[in-house]
Image: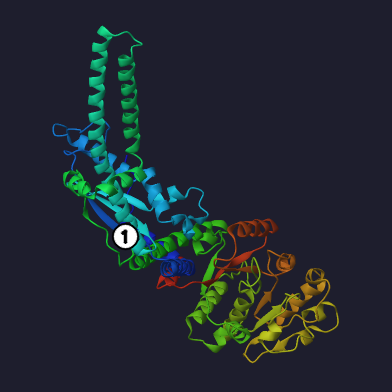
Amino acid sequence: MESPRPSIKEEGLQLKNYTHIIRRRADVLILFFVATVSVITIGSFIMEPVYRATTTLLIDPESPNVLTTTGMVELESQNYFSYKEYYQSQAELLTSYTLVKKVFNEFGLEEQFEYFDAKEPIKKFLKTIKVDPVRDTRLLKLNVDNKDPELAAKIANRMANLYVMRNLYYISRTELTNLLKNEYLKLESRVSEYAKVYKEGHPEMIKVKNEMAELVAKIEKEKKSVYDYDNIEDYLKPEAQHQLAGFKANNISVQDSAEIPVVPIKPKRALNIVLAVVIGIMGGIGMAFFSEYLDDTAKSIEDVEEIAPWPFLGSVPRMKGRGKRAELEKDVRVQRLPRDPVSESYRSIRTSILFSSTEERPLRSVVVTSPGPQEGKTTTLCNLGISIAQNGSKALLVDADMRKPRLHEIFNIENKNGLSDFLCGRIEFVSSVKATDIEGLSITNGGTHPPNPSELLSSQKMKYFIQEAERKFDFLLFDSPPVGMLTDAMIFSSMVDGMIMVIESSKTSKRTLARIYKLINSAGVRVVGIVLNKISIHGDDYYHRYYRHYYGKP
């Protein structure tokens, strides 16, 4: 049975998820792209150019050749593979170690920087030489690369000329070797005749055998001299006219001598930049998906609900702006920019919270916390308090984060006569409550920094504070330390009607969230819901995800 194919709608959602990942990881993509393009571009411009000089050789396999030491090889009746093998052999001979070493020493290349410390300079030099057959022809291209264009041309021409001379020398010396062999056969015949007349030690017999031994030595010497390039040049210099005549009969000749190259073969800057752009884009996308794969944080509503299936109250997009002033403005965004989409998000969350209150389970006091620091719990608490007050209710914000109180900074009051002072019995309840410039909104600041915040929050005075506050206000919002770091939120969460968990997108790890979910569930705390904070907005993605959860999946 075939598995059902994904619908067009599902494929569209998958594509949207991919684009969402790329947008979310745009910093990784851009960083990889800029680094790749910069490194390759800078490298292309600072790299020393390399030039290529090319000499073209014509090789005719039907003429005398250099494949063997026994004479001319006839290839007329042989097939394509024989010709191919022949040209491969010529290419190997053209780059033979003996020839390459002679050229290397002749030009004093061992003194060049790139060969100065090389363990095997000849082999390194050999890598700069390449022989390419020209398809469907009898031509070979001898390519020599060097940073000096003039030297590249000289090396290419010198190698080609040495190879041609070696071939010419071989032809001439082969003829001489054949003559010596014929002479040797004649002497063998004479020995046979003398053997019928003379004894082994006869002077004539000894003379003939000595001549035979001399011929054998000459033949062996001629064979060895074919591969000695110094002997080749010594032999050809005094016979210039013979050399020219020999070139005409030679089966190997230089068709085009190498000229000094003008344009370097590398670096190919334009091509490198194009490749850098392609690699930067593709590699950047790959790095974006790889970093997404390694990222264990809860980024979306679905990620959070998969681990902690608490009610979803709403999402708040990331607000721009840096610095202390910008941070304070974020905390009272609903008051400063009431028509802003972010303010609308807080009003939607307020509505969700109020709808969570029922006759059986009334909701008048909540603690606002988060898994870790700097996830936006205080900002969420302040804006929710303002929106509740704007809705006509009397709201009280209580700074129960006595280790790091912030409400006094946000509402510009002194941090004295606060919650800790009331819990320690230094002031009355009424003295701990301060009115703000916003109608219907009051706050209780953290107060004097106490040595034992946890004990104070679990005291009977804390219960009394909540009871008094509920008599005078319609809704209480407590700002507590992060639940993942301290036990303060868990201690007095049983004293209030519920808990609101503020989770910053792409910050809290799924492992941490799972641990907190288990901890809160085991304590029997009522979680009113989740606020997903600081989410990235890309096109209509935020609104699509929010309304899909608000109204339910279509």
Q: Position of residue 359 (x, y in %)?
A: 60, 69
Residue at the extreme front: 203
Q: Nearer the viewer, residue 327 or 5?
A: 327
What colour scheme has been applied to the protein in the rendered image? Answer: rainbow
Q: Looking at the rendering, which quadrant does residue 510 occupy? A: bottom right
Question: Which residue is at a point 50% across and 52% down the rendered structure image?
Answer: 118
Q: Looking at the rendering, which quadrant does residue 521 occupy? A: bottom right
Q: Is residue 143 above or below residue 325?
A: above
Q: Is residue 398 above or below residue 517?
A: below
Q: Circle 1 is placed at which residue position? A: 153
Question: Which residue is at a point 61% across and 78% down the rendered structure image?
Answer: 379
Q: Position of residue 93 (x, y in %)?
A: 31, 42
Residue at the extreme left: 77
Please, what secondary structure does the residue beneath circle 1 have?
Answer: helix
Residue 417 visible, this angle: yes
Q: Nearer the viewer, residue 218 or 386?
A: 218
Quadrant showing the N terminus: top left
Q: Nearer the viewer, residue 413 or 49?
A: 49
Q: Nearer the viewer, residue 379 or 248?
A: 248
- In the picture, measured across the screen, residue 539 lies left or right of residue 136, that is right
Quadrant showing the C terminus: bottom left
Q: Is residue 344 above or below residue 222?
A: below
Question: Which residue is at a point 42% across and 68% down the rendered structure image?
Answer: 37
Q: Position of residue 481 (x, y in %)?
A: 70, 71
Q: Position of residue 292 (x, y in %)?
A: 49, 60
- In the picture, measured across the screen, residue 324 lies left or right of residue 152, that is right
